[in-house]
């Protein structure tokens, strides 16, 4: 019995030798190389997302004009305004750059919040089972019975428009799928020998869930979170387009499109194409990263790349 306890405790990362800890940098670099080899398209998509994130962080330094300053002159792309101006004369490129900041804040926080809740919920539901699992999964069924955008719209009607309420609404729509995926992994992991051994030696339930079950669910939830980023950007854009998301004058990619189409039956092409491209490219890149990450974390593919 003491041997079992020792074997389980040795799985703790804190018990790793210092020489192993010193090789973290090399292992990270090797993992990056394997990721690039496994999916060049995923690597390019990751580079695109890094550019978008840098653009959002350093928006005040990168944007050529104040995104809220009107000149009241609508014009197409020119030397002074590369992507043109909107109907109030505000620079479209600057608004796209600052809009990336708001859109990414909504996407990252809503996905982090929704998937974190779904992750913990799925672990508890899958491991505890019985009545708790039955009741919680019926609640998940109720949430999944609504299309994500419809559920977000219903929540926005109740909560009202605004940055915080958009984040909450989108986060709620992310919870059911992350809960189901995490639970499915837990149902397999809890039957493994090392989890059974931990139960036999009297390790508390919460410790088993956090130390032995949760780490096995990290890889699947990372893939799900990456795919959810694209879905969150689409949801924010759709809500703002419908006038239920980020209120003007703060720029987001969705309300840039929504404001233009609401104001004119045939809006200037540059006011539709460029914000639409920003939304499309970011969503496509997020989905490609998710696909590449799923393949990279596949143990069989990883062995072929080593």
Image: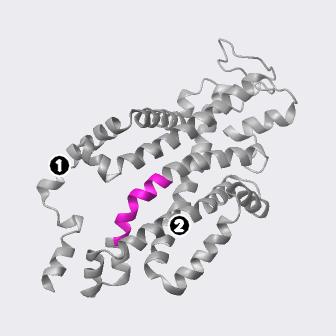
Q: Position of residue 267 (x, y in %)?
A: 82, 26
Q: Position of residue 38 (x, y in %)?
A: 34, 39
| Residue neighbourhood size for the residue with mark 2, other residues' Cα within 10 Å, grouped as few (<14), some (14–19), many (≥20) | many
To which quarter of the image does residue 169 belong?
Answer: bottom right
To which quarter of the image does residue 187 belong?
Answer: bottom left
Q: Position of residue 178 (x, y in %)?
A: 52, 62
Span shown in magenta: 213-224
Q: Is residue 286 above or below residue 225?
A: above
**Viewed as shown, does residue 250 lie left or right of 260?**
left
Q: What separation in Å lies between label 2 and label 1 (alpha carbons)? A: 35 Å
Is residue 44 part of the magenta span, yes or no? no
- Residue at left 72%, top 53%? 162
| Residue neighbourhood size for the residue with mark 1, other residues' Cα within 10 Å, grouped as few (<14), some (14–19), many (≥20) | few
Q: Which residue is mark 2?
A: 180
Q: Is residue 12 visible?
A: yes
**Residue nearest the observer in this picture, 69 or 213:** 213
Rendered-image quadrant of the C terminus: top left
Q: Which residue is mark 1?
A: 23
Tell me which numbered mark, 2 or 1, is placed earlier along the sequence: 1
Q: Is residue 250 visible?
A: no
- Residue at left 71%, top 33%? 68
Identify the image's colour scheme: rainbow, by chain, secondary structure or one colour. Answer: one colour
**Viewed as shown, does residue 182 lie left or right of 89?**
left
**Viewed as shown, does residue 22 lie left or right of 280?**
left
């Amino acid at each position: 019995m003491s041997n079992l306890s020792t074997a389980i405790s040795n799985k703790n990362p804190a018990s790793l030798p210092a020489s192993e800890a010193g090789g973290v940098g090399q292992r990270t670099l090797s993992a990056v190389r394997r990721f690039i080899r496994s999916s060049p398209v995923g690597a390019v998509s990751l580079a695109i997302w890094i550019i978008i994130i840098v653009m959002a962080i350093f928006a005040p330094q990168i944007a050529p004009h104040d995104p809220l300053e009107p000149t009241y002159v609508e014009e197409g792309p020119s030397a002074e305004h590369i992507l043109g101006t909107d109907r109030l004369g505000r620079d479209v490129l600057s608004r796209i750059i600052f809009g990336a900041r708001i859109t990414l804040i909504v996407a990252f926080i809503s996905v982090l919040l929704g998937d974190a809740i779904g992750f913990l919920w799925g672990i508890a539901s899958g491991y505890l089972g019985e009545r708790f699992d039955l009741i919680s999964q019926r609640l998940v069924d109720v949430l999944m019975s609504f299309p994500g955008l419809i559920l977000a719209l219903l929540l926005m009607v109740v909560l009202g428009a605004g940055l915080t309420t958009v984040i909450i609404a989108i986060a709620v729509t992310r919870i059911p799928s992350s809960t189901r995926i995490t639970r499915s992994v837990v149902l397999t992991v809890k039957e493994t020998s090392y989890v059974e051994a931990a139960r036999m030696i009297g390790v508390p339930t919460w410790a088993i869930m956090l130390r032995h079950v949760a780490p096995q669910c990290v890889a699947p939830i990372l893939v799900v979170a990456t795919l959810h980023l694209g879905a969150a950007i689409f949801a924010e854009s759709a809500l703002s387009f419908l006038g239920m998301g980020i209120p003007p004058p703060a720029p987001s990619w969705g309300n840039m499109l929504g404001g233009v189409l609401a104001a004119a039956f045939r809006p200037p092409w540059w006011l539709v194409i460029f914000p639409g491209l920003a939304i499309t490219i970011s969503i496509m890149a997020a989905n490609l990263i998710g696909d590449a990450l799923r393949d990279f974390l596949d143990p069989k593919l990883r062995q072929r790349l080593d």
